Image (cartoon, helix red, strand yellow):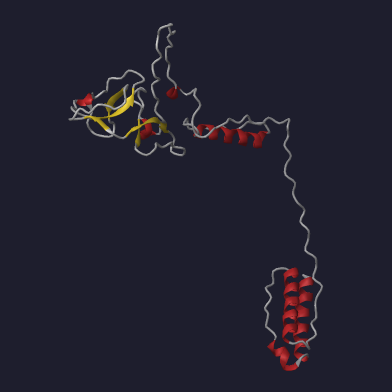
Amino acid sequence: MKSFQLLFSLLGALATVTGLQGGNCVSRCPQVKCLVTDEIAVCRCINNRERRCYRICPDYTPTFTLCPAKPISTPISAPSLDSTASCVCDDVFCIQMWPDSCHCANDAAQKCYEKCGVVPALQSCGDGVPPLSISTLTTSTKTKTPSATSTYASPTPIHQICGGGRANSLSCGDGYTCIADPYTPNSCGPACDQWGICVKDEMCGGFAGKDCEGKGQVCHDDPRDDCDPHQGGADCAGLCVWSHGSVDDRVT
């Protein structure tokens, strides 16, 4: 409180002194109103006023006040991790859709490490294609033992995988469309963020009964239209799919 009284007395003295110095020049000095917040701020305000007046009136003799030093704040140290205390990581529920599930599990392991210091075992999420252990990408085939006179048949082409999670959806090339694999039971394909296959976007079947161009391809119902052979639809248009299973939705 005494410091504030001293500063206010100094302000009054400065006003008296400035009226005596510099004549009319001092009258052009800026009128500075200091906001009383703390004694350091008031002191700096007074000194700034003196500097500004001196710039306008070089003959004016400024009177500066030695301002008190700003108190140094003592940093608060972060609490140390007590290794002996029991620490439980938070439960995290991840959506089971690759690669979102992989990134979610890695984030949960990282947060557990930051909280409890448990070194995480992070998974490799790859380039967005799920590992081959997922059942929707595997097919079982029986290999026959070739005889000495047998001829090897040409391998059946496979379809490119498409669809998947919205964040990392795989698209097809030009001239192809992504549909649910008719040989995967109960699959809704890209319509529900599941995996699908890329097929050539050309109609087969229909009223003209157009056949597929590729040998070994089967014309399956096109899921994009309203014509469904299972619901009494006739002459439904289809899409050509390389045969790799047994289904009953063929349209030709």
Q: Residue at x 50, y 22 (%)?
A: 133
- Residue 28 shown left or right of residue 153 in the figure: right
Please name whichever residue, 100 or 26, is drawn nearer the observer in this view of the structure: 100
Please name whichever residue, 36 or 132, is drawn nearer the observer in this view of the structure: 132
Q: Is residue 46 above or below residue 178?
A: below
Please name whichever residue, 77 or 54, is drawn nearer the observer in this view of the structure: 54
In terms of image quadrants, where is residue 226?
A: top left
How many numbered badges does the structure rendering display? 0
Locate the N terminus and report the quarter of the image it occupies: bottom right
In the displayed image of the protein, which residue is found farthest to the bottom? 23
Locate the C terminus and report the quarter of the image it occupies: top left
Q: Residue at x 67, y 78 (%)?
A: 33
Q: Position of residue 236 (x, y in %)?
A: 21, 29
- Residue 54 shown left or right of residue 172 in the figure: right
In the displayed image of the protein, which residue is found farthest to the right? 66
Q: Position of residue 197 (x, y in %)?
A: 38, 30
Q: Residue at x 35, y 18 (%)?
A: 245
In the displayed image of the protein, which residue is found farthest to the top? 148
Q: Is residue 135 above or below residue 56?
A: above
- Residue 162 shown left or right of residue 37 in the figure: left
In terms of image quadrants, where is residue 195?
A: top left
Q: Residue at x 68, y 80 (%)?
A: 32
Q: Position of residue 193 (x, y in %)?
A: 40, 34
Q: Position of residue 23 (x, y in %)?
A: 75, 93
Q: Is residue 152 above or below residue 249?
A: above
